[in-house]
Amino acid sequence: MTSKISDIQRFSASNAQTEQYFLPEEKRLKGNPLQSLTNHYSSPCGQFHAGVWQSAGGKWNVNYTEHEFCDILEGSSIICDSEGNSLTVEAGDKFVIPAGFTGTWEVVEHCRKIYVIFEQS
C-alpha cells in the first residue's frame, strides 16, 4: 500500500467528531467526570489510533490492554498502579503506559492530552 501527502492526518485540519461521555458507574471511584474524545486517526487494521482526550476532575479504575503514548497538554493527573505507587503528570509531560497496566487515573485539574494507542492482536 502506498500513501500520499493527502493521506497525512493533520489534527488542526481534521473534521473528526468529538464524542462526550461519562464513565460507567462500576469504573468510577470519585466524581462523575465528563470526558471527551476526538479520534483523529485510526489505521486500516484498527490497531493504531491517535487523537485528543480530555476529562474533568474525578478518579476511576484503569486496565490497559493497549500501549498508550500520552502528551499532557493541560492540567494534571495522578496515575497509581495496583500496588499503590503513584506518578503525577502535568502539562508538558510525555510518557508511555504499557499494555497490562492496572490501577487508577485521577484528574486533579482538568486534563487534556494527545494520545497514540497501539492495540496488540
Image: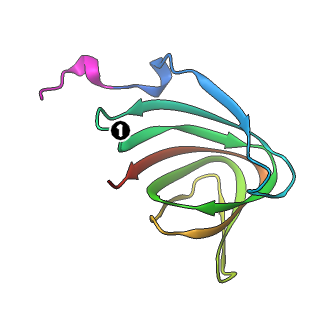
Magenta extent: 1-8
8 displayed left or right of 70: left
Q: Is residue 120 in the magenta section?
A: no
Q: Which quadrant of the view contains residue 34?
A: top right
37 displayed left or right of 98: right
Q: Residue 8 at x, y = what percent?
A: 30, 25
Farthest right residue?
A: 31
Q: Is residue 6 in the magenta section?
A: yes
Q: Which quadrant of the view contains residue 28?
A: bottom right
Identify the secondary structure beneath mark 1: loop
Q: Residue 97 at x, y = what percent?
A: 49, 63
Please tell me whether the stretch drawn in magenta is mainly helix, strand or loop: loop
Is 30 placed above or below 84 here? above
* Residue displayed at 81% across by 50% down: 57
Residue holding disc 1: 46
Q: Nearer the viewer, residue 26 or 69?
A: 26
Residue 107 seen in render: no
Q: Nearer the viewer, residue 40 or 60?
A: 60
Q: Nearer the viewer, residue 37 or 28?
A: 28
Farthest bottom residue?
A: 83
* Residue displayed at 56% across by 37% down: 52
Which residue type does callout 1 highlight? Gly
Q: Residue 83 at x, y = what percent?
A: 65, 83
* Residue displayed at 46% across by 55% down: 68
Q: Nearer the viewer, residue 109 or 49?
A: 49
Q: What's the coloring here?
A: rainbow
The quarter of the rendered structure image containing the N terminus is: top left
